[in-house]
């Protein structure tokens, strides 16, 4: 019987070592294409993925020996989980593994934005010593609205608790999570009270382009907007228009609608160039959940959930 496991993404050697120690034959192909997955998967019992390869009906129908799929990180939108489970394939993810990394990066990006850390540093590299123009805003006393209170949303709230902020959290599918430090809120509460808003949602048909012109205009004041979740939660032209018009005060973006720059249209190139030049925008290349520690934790949690450890 086959003991092959296909790993389609860069991962910590810990994952490979643990699988091999349990007798699996690991096919480590972090640069594999969709078509190559199709041709390789037919006799594999396990599949490890991140956000690069779509695991759809076409792949699953060819994976006649597949018993399980492990997702390193959070978000299962690229996997047809209902169809996989209908074929007896066990699917797990590991959002617990990188939630601390995302929470810490979100705090770091927010402080960077509010205190003009990136802006002033870039100016200094060009010989500009500017103090008045880089006067910052204190996070202390601000109201932070968190939309989506799962692993990363709740961890971001936890990381914020030393900053003496007011935390409002909304989750359409969860209630009863309020604490002394975090107030369970409605979207109307967040629109009315927030100074900062951070989205921590999966990408679904319901959440795609949630952050659009109407969303940005709904806030009582210009907010600092944050997205460390999925790029397609945001309508990029609407975000740029809101920044240009002062509808929002600034943005922290770890994710973009299209994260493959070599496929960019001229419009997408112009959008990214605008965001990178904007003094009130901080952009990073989807690294929030990518810490050295998270790479081990995600692997360990996936293996634990699959009962391999």
Image (cartoon, rainbow, N blue to C red):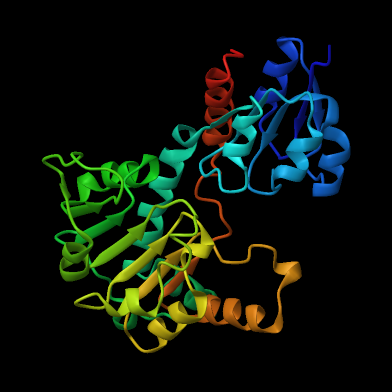
Percent position (x, y) of residue 162?
Answer: 21, 45
Which residue is situated farthest in the left direction here? 180
Decide: is 235 above or below 161.
below
Q: Which residue is found at the position 16% from the left and 42% from the top?
A: 178
Specify whether residue 208 is in view: yes
* Residue 30 lies in quadrant: top right
Percent position (x, y) of residue 64?
Answer: 79, 27
Give 77 or 234, whichever is nearer the viewer. Answer: 77
Looking at the image, residue 69 sits to the left or right of residue 280; the answer is right
Decide: is 223 above or below 147.
below
Dividing the image into 4 quarters, which one contains the N terminus? top right
Percent position (x, y) of residue 181?
Answer: 15, 43
Percent position (x, y) of residue 34?
Answer: 80, 48
Q: Which residue is found at the position 56% from the left and 26% from the top?
A: 302
Specify whether residue 249 is in view: no
Counting the numbered discs, the total is: 0
Which residue is situated farthest in the bottom direction here? 245
Looking at the image, residue 136 sits to the left or right of residue 105; the answer is left
Give 221 or 71, whichever is nearer the viewer. Answer: 71
* Residue 158 lies in quadrant: top left
Dividing the image into 4 quarters, which one contains the C terminus? top right
Looking at the image, residue 302 sits to the left or right of residue 221; the answer is right
Which residue is situated farthest in the front direction here? 86
């Amino acid at each position: 019987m086959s003991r092959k496991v296909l790993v389609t993404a860069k991962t910590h050697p810990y994952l490979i070592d643990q699988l091999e120690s349990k007798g699996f034959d690991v096919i480590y192909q972090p640069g594999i294409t969709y078509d190559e997955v199709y041709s390789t998967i037919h006799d594999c019992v396990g599949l490890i993925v991140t956000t690069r390869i779509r695991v759809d009906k076409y792949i699953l129908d060819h994976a006649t020996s597949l018993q399980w799929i492990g997702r390193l990180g959070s978000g299962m939108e690229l996997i047809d989980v209902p169809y996989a489970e209908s074929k007896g394939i066990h699917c797990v993810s590991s959002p617990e593994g990188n939630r601390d990394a995302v929470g810490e990066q979100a705090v770091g990006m927010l402080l960077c934005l509010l205190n003009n850390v990136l802006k002033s540093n870039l100016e200094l590299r060009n010989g500009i010593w500017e103090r008045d123009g880089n006067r910052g805003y204190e996070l202390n006393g601000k109201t932070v609205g968190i939309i989506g209170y799962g692993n990363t949303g709740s961890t971001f709230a936890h990381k914020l608790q030393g900053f003496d902020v007011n935390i409002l959290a909304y989750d359409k599918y969860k209630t009863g999570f309020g604490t002394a430090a975090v107030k369970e809120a409605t979207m109307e509460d967040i629109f009315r009270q927030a100074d900062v808003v951070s989205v921590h949602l999966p990408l679904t048909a319901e959440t795609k382009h949630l952050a659009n012109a109407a969303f940005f205009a709904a806030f009582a004041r210009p907010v600092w907007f944050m997205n460390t979740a999925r790029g397609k939660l945001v309508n990029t032209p609407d975000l740029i228009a809101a920044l240009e018009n002062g509808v929002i005060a600034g943005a922290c973006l770890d994710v973009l609608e299209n994260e493959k720059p070599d496929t960019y249209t001229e419009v997408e190139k112009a959008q990214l160039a605008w965001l990178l030049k904007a003094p009130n925008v901080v952009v990073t290349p989807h690294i929030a959940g990518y810490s050295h520690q998270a790479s081990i934790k995600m692997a360990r949690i996936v293996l634990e959930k699959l009962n391999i450890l």
